[in-house]
Image (cartoon, rainbow, N blue to C red):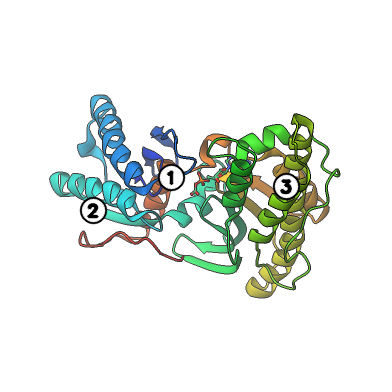
Amino acid sequence: MQILGIETSCDETSIAIVDGNRKILFHKTLSQDSKYGGIVPEVASRKHLENIKLILQELVGLCDLSTIDAIAVTAGPGLIGSLMVGVVCAKAIASVLKKPIIAVNHLAGHALTIQLIEEVQYPFLTLLVSGGNTQFLIVKDVDNYTKIGETLDDALGEAFDKVARMLGFGYPGGAIIERRANFGDENKYVLAKPMINSPNCNFSFSGLKTDVARKIQSLQPLDEQKICDLCASFQKSVTDVLAKKILLAFEKFALETGKACNDFVLCGGVSANQYIRNKLIDLCRLHNVRFLSSPLSLCGDNAAMIALVGVEKFKKGLIDNINFAPRAQWPL
Ligand code: KG4
């Protein structure tokens, strides 16, 4: 079995082929440079139109698409114009080749990415931390998820990007903050840890962002060392909150499933952060939980994860009517 996957939910244009054994046979992602300090939806959609053609031309030169069993495409959630490019392209390929089409939820892609690398038994606990989402999910099957907590305002990646912008870094800023933090003192500044003591698995990051803005004001003029210390202190604050909430999520997982949590999966773009990973690896070790996370190349938006969900859905006979519409909002 071979499934073609297409991902265009935000600003990455990506196409992949994954086989029935979850092996990636082809994978190419083109990212967009942002000169605007963030994503401009119309610009992103236009760039997808250029990039998707480039990747498809390369793919068609390498293999015969008629051997594909089905086409899986991100149908949401995401920017509607960006989604439209991938969905229309997938529908065109499906119509011409007379192949089934599978509408994939982008969040399911992130949640299941780990299966491209490791065998993980259902149910498992995942924390999805990306530019658009921050949520705890109990993953029970490819089409069965229970959300047990989420951010009430900004996503964690969004908080990283907003703090990066305040410090004058480019977009996306998460990785830049991490690099600067490596040279900073994480205990230099005490920053807010919103909702750290609330008895649930929800988050809020907008207050922390405001706290960083105030700190930046009070530290003027900023020098390189102050910037690195701020980055390290910010990273520590969010990681302390994540760690506390993960302990609550372990308990909620046990209540919901009737068994102890054996596997914890960190996924989404922010999971590329090595500081966060290391802290959570230690936490999981302490609680006898296996910590899992994807290689950096699969942390961000990519089509291999969409093709993978396609493989798993196809195995269960879960294909869609070609009339489906992309959805800007689509909770799992
Ligand atoms: O999953 P992703 O590629 O896109 C969404 O679906 O949102 O995640 C992108 C987010 C951005 O906010 C980016 O700043 C953040 O992931 N990110 C990081 C790191 N690398 C990417 N955040 C913190 N540390 C990193 N090393």
For image coordinates 31% across by 40% down, the residue present is: 48
Marks 1 and 3, the one that precedes in the sequence: 1
Mark 1 or mark 2: which is in front?
1
Q: Nearer the viewer, residue 214 or 96?
A: 214
**Image: 111 above or below 275:** below
Q: Is mark 2 within 8 Å of ligand 1?
A: no
**Residue 180 position within the rendered picture, expressed as x and y whole percent measured from the top left:** 71, 33
For disc 3, the marked residue is 217
Q: Determine which of the numbered discs, if any, sits on residue 39 in the image.
A: 1
Q: State the separation of the CA atoms marked 1 and 3.
A: 26 Å
Q: Is residue 124 left or right of residue 26?
A: right
Q: Element under label 1?
A: loop
**Image: 257 above or below 292:** below
Quarter of the image with the N terminus in it: top left
Q: Nearer the viewer, residue 287 or 133?
A: 133
Q: State the separation of the CA atoms marked 1 and 2.
A: 32 Å
The answer to whether the residue labelled 1 contacts the one labelled 2, judged by CB atoms less than 8 Å apart, is no
Q: Amino acid at mark 3?
A: Gln
Taking the image as four quarters, which one is ligand 1 found in? top right
Circle 1 Cα neighbour tier, 10 Å, few/some/many (<14 / 14–19 / ≥20): some
For disc 2, the marked residue is 100
For image coordinates 77% across by 58% down, the residue present is: 192
**Residue 64 position within the rendered picture, expressed as x and y whole percent measured from the top left:** 22, 31
Q: Element under label 3?
A: helix
Mark 2 or mark 3: which is in front?
3
Q: Is residue 33 left or right of residue 90?
A: right
The answer to whether the residue labelled 2 contacts the one labelled 3, judged by CB atoms less than 8 Å apart, is no
Q: Element under label 2?
A: loop
Marks 2 and 3, the one that precedes in the sequence: 2
